[in-house]
Image: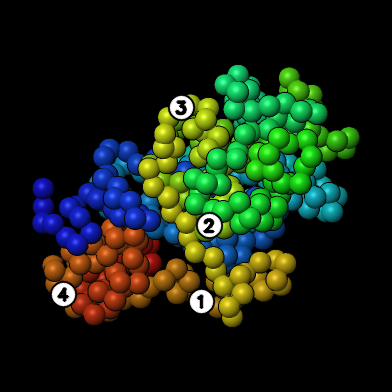
């Protein structure tokens, strides 16, 4: 074993307070896009951070298997396709093309596995059936609900905050069919005119959290090393994804560590379509090089100690600003190595 650093011995990455020893393969599940609109910087930030994580894990000696899903069955997408007068799958495929183009322009590597929700209906039905069998879910009016009252507590949220977020993200805490307002739909009944698939509970479609749980279980088995996505996915999405998977498999924890990329703000406000402050990746790349959009620049210099310090900074919760400061101050090998590691120059 080599020289110890502040971040721990080589082959360790600290992520969100968890020391993650890199052993063999690193299974990274990234919650991907709902392809209903052009990519803005707020979305892109999460994927750039996940890509940075993959590069740091790879540099630390792990064989990284990245899975980034496409949520192509979702109420927001169905509504947008409806407004555009397009079938939802064709509409999603076009948006996906623009997303892939923006990611390629940002130097974000293609994930090894890219599951699409519409191809995992059978797995969601199996998940719902398994949860019913274990008494972790119940059926009501063509819907299957997961008993989720404990999930908020595990996410360290009080009931009031959990209910507010559940409402904001479409989990419908006011649904009177539920036993508890924090139960979530694993399977949702489809009304006439909505896309629906045959199930033991009638025509319906998967719930969002169940889609990601089913895709992750199918691709990686009962656990992943890192569950990644935007900070706004922490609750309810990631919390329920993990809760569903654990209730189904009995394997805990579902994820060893989490990466939640910070929300991108414009003049203090969260970047969101509803706020009308979107900065589109395509527009930004017309005026700025990739190395400015992904954080970074370099200079000339020297130093093996700088190289060690730069690597230690990256292994310490992906501290890219600290790694850049080392590269800027010392340049040389540290700067060149950081540039190629992050795909900046
Ligand atoms: Zn997800």
Q: Earlier in the sequence, mark 4 or mark 1?
A: 1
- Secondary structure beneath dot 3 equals loop
Tell me, for residue 27, which label it has, or none. none
Decide: few, some or many residues near mark 2? Use Cα within 10 Å; few <14, some 14-19, many ≥20: many
Q: Which residue is mark 1?
A: 288
Q: How is the image coloured?
A: rainbow
Name the residue rendered at 24%, 67% in the picture. 310
- Secondary element at image label 2: strand
Quarter in which the C terminus is drawn: bottom left
Q: Nearer the viewer, residue 294 or 288?
A: 294
Name which residue lies at 55% across and 78% down: 287
Q: Position of residue 276 (x, y in %)?
A: 71, 72
Residues tagged 4 and 1 counted as in contact (Cβ below 8 A) = no
Q: Earlier in the sequence, mark 1 or mark 3?
A: 3
How many angstroms separate mark 4 from mark 1 (CA)?
Answer: 28 Å
Q: Which quadrant of the structure image shows residue 241?
A: top right
Q: Secondary structure at mark 1?
A: loop
Residue 230: mark: 2
């Amino acid at each position: 074993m080599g020289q110890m650093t502040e971040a721990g011995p080589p082959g360790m990455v600290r992520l969100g307070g968890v020391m993650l020893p890199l052993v063999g393969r690193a299974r990274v599940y990234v919650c991907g896009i709902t392809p209903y609109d052009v990519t803005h910087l707020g979305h892109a930030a999460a994927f750039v951070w996940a890509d940075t994580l993959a590069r740091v894990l790879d540099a630390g000696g792990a064989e990284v298997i990245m899975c980034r899903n496409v949520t192509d069955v979702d109420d927001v997408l169905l509504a947008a396709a409806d407004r555009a007068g397009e079938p939802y799958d064709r509409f999603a495929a076009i948006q996906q093309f623009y997303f892939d183009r923006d990611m390629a322009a940002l130097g974000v590597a293609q994930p090894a596995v890219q599951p699409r929700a519409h191809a995992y209906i059978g797995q969601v039905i199996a998940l719902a059936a398994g949860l019913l069998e274990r008494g972790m879910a119940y059926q009501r009016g063509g819907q299957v609900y997961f008993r989720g009252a404990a999930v908020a507590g595990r996410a360290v949220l009080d009931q009031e905050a959990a209910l507010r977020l559940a409402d904001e993200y479409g989990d419908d805490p006011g649904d009177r069919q539920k036993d508890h307002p924090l139960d979530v739909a694993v399977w949702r009944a489809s009304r006439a005119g909505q896309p629906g698939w045959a199930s033991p509970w009638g025509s319906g479609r998967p719930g969002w959290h169940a889609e990601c749980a089913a895709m992750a279980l199918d691709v990686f088995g009962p656990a992943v090393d890192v569950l990644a996505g935007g900070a706004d996915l922490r609750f309810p999405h990631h919390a329920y994804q993990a809760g569903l998977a654990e209730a189904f498999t009995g394997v805990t924890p579902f994820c060893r560590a989490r990466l939640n990329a910070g929300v991108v703000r414009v003049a203090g406000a969260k970047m969101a379509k509803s706020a009308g402050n979107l900065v589109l990746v395509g527009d930004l790349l017309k005026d700025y090089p990739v190395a400015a959009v992904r954080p970074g620049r370099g200079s000339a210099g020297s130093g093996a100690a700088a190289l060690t310090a730069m690597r230690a900074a990256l292994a310490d919760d992906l501290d890219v600003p600290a790694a850049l400061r080392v590269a800027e101050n010392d340049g040389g090998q540290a700067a060149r190595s950081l540039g190629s590691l992050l795909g900046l120059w």
